[in-house]
Image: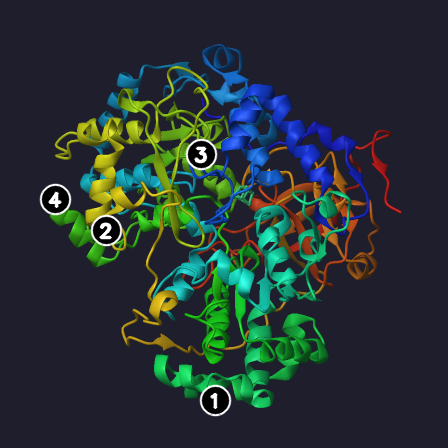
Amino acid sequence: MHPTSEPPIDPEESRLRVGPPADHAAGLKAVQVSMGRALRQMGPVKTARNLLTLNQADGFDCMSCAWPDPQGHRHTAEFCENGAKAVSWEGVRDTVGPAFFAEHSITDLAGRTDYWLEKQGRLTHPMVRRDGGDHYEPISWADAFALIGAHLNALDSPDEAIFYTSGRASNEAAFLYQLLARSYGTNNLPDCSNMCHESTSVGLAGTIGVGKGSVSLQDLHEADLIVVSGQNPGTNHPRMLTALEIAKRNGARILAINPLPEAGLLRFDNPQKARGLAGHGTGLADKLLRIRSNGDLALWQAIGHLLVTAHESAIDSAFVEAYTIGFESWKKHIRELDRGAVLRATGLTWAEIEEAAGMLASSKRIVHCWAMGITQHHNAVATIKEFVNVTLLQGMIGKPGAGLCPVRGHSNVQGDRTMGIWEKPPAIFLDRLRDEFGFEPPRHHGYDAADAVRALRDGRAKVFIALGGNFVAAMSDTNVTAAAMRKAALTVQISTKLNRSHVDAGRTALILPTLGRTERDLTGGRVQRVTVEDSMSAVHASRGRSAPAGPLLRSEVAIVCGIGASIAGNEIIWADFSDNYDEIRERIGRVVPGCEGYADKIRTAGGFTMPHGPRDHRTFPTAAGRAIFTVSPLEVLSVPPGRLVLQTLRSHDQFNTTIYGLDDRYRGIRSGRRVLFISAADLTELGFADGDHVDLISEWEDGVERRADRFRLVEYPTPKGCVAAYYPETNPLVPLDSQAAESGTPTSKWVVVRCERVKKVPHVGAGAADTRT
Ligand code: SF4
């Protein structure tokens, strides 16, 4: 029996309250929330042990975002509110074992919200749902591995199996996992990067030759201008605010470009400082451009145009001459700018754009930061290439205080890619893998995340194994993804907590409980460390201290080795690795470019930084051996009358698909999530009022009607025509085939929707309140 669940609506939404948005981030409230959650969920002893070792040199790496740790002095509390929430979420005392699954059928679980599922506690036992069953039952580890082996051994082709990775997996687990997939015979290694920063990887690799950012924390501190585009650091990378504050104290200006005036772009009340706790924080954005969704490509073409035509002294001609190609073609293109198109695309005035260009022209050290507000668009790669054009024009790469800074959202998503989690591996990586392990890896490309869904949907893939994450909730087109997953013969979820992907699972489904970052890993009877890489290419060790949530939990490394050993004819000696992570690191050192001597390097406190040619010595490993100016057509995406452009985003009480609570205090939302942020002008034009409820229907060229029901309209300072709502609730609206050109990233920041008025709102009654003034 297979439930056909759509994520249900939380009955708690009846208590939704709306107030004014905050004008600053962090402060005393952040401390209160952090400590309150930690003490409630972990108790005092575990709270002290976990929070005092979080992000410390000999402690464990925060499992939340990929913001780097300082290289020198670290504070006693070297974390943010959302880091503390992530640790509390993992360290919670509640557990989910066989008794829970005996009580709750899968049909029952399908009727629960994602928030409820994850709130139940840590998974403690390997569990299986047999084909036709409606309950998960306990299974031994040996039988679980045998079951996986039986399925993999029976496939007609290795390409019928998919090996997905979430960005939490350690470098050691990721390296073994790609070895598992490739020694089995497939490059089907989709990852969460496919859904977020793939556009960055493609855009940077195609222009500077390296798909990673080029700055260190020190560069941010030394910059005199920091551009923050399509990013909400207050919620998604909160310790970035500390770096911005240091930069401001050093005299930097900040140019923020975002549709919403997020609290973390306005002011930072640093809770490490008395001033911050007292509410006297540091002002952040010197200029905030409230741009229309998808206006960034046009904006950066306009800024390039103004630099070339009105600020020639800002051009670093020596750099352009020595290190780049394609400048003249780009200059010709950019000179012919269509101003009218720029103004339509951005919703900004020409004076605002001139002011922004003037800020760049008058700066000597510029760091460009961006996140998903840029990457999840149809033309995301072109936009990132336009950032690069302006960066090259001004020679802002490979010098102190300057460079490109994509800010990644999941703690080890960059490291996993370095370790070979990629459906399109480069030949050099495969050659080294072959030489080290003595097998010929597959050379044809595998499935990315969207292709994985298509393959499952169409019956071309039958087994889906996930090293962490919550693929069903994270991926676009939720109903299509869930249905595809239910068609699989076998799904395997290596997980810490219950989630939607355990409900919308294959006909046979396994849950394999694994250790979290906070927990002591005694695999093989010795204390094991793992390693991770942050957004700025710094690699370091991570070691948890807390007792595991249950005695049956295994490390990700041990689980991957167990699966590997179950595959008939696989010649990798998995036992060499399962107890000895140093041996894995020795192999990483011999296979992964840039990781030579890895096992030794990570023994140094603070680890090491991966080499990066453009950053380190202005060498650009492109085919031409130079950085490349690229020409992209200026696009103005049109929206039919009466329709709006939706961007999906996180609340402040959320990390990716994990929902910690129902508040988003930075945007004035309490006790609910089904809200649609909409401008006053759109409310008037569409005949709605703040507080009305609507169903959202997305419109896409395939003609399929995708719905997400019952959202309360919240008047908000978002540009006219642009609305915003939380994911994963709105992921059902993002069509699977609506992907960024070149990178395939879902276009979650550009979803054309219409609103239909809800006449009767069943759950909203006397308890609903609106405290907005
Ligand atoms: S900034 Fe990111 S990595 Fe650092 S503590 Fe906060 S959530 Fe964790």
Label of residue 439 in the image: 4
Q: Amino acid at mark 4?
A: Phe
- Horizontal side of 283 relative to 431 (left or right) equals right
Q: Amino acid at mark 2?
A: Glu
- Horizontal side of 374 relative to 205 (left or right) equals right
Label of residue 596 in the image: 2
First of labels 3, 1 by sequence position: 3
Q: Residue at x 47, y 83 (%)?
A: 316
Label of residue 183 in the image: none
Q: Residue at x 51, y 68 (%)?
A: 383
Q: Where is mark 3, residue-wise?
A: 59
Mark toward the viewer: 3 or 1: 3
| Circle 1 residues within 10 Å: few <14, some 14–19, many ≥20 | few
The image shows residue 651 at horizontal and vertical percentages of 65, 43
Q: Where is mark 1, residue-wise?
A: 332
Mark 1 and mark 2 in contact? Answer it, CB < 8 Å.
Answer: no
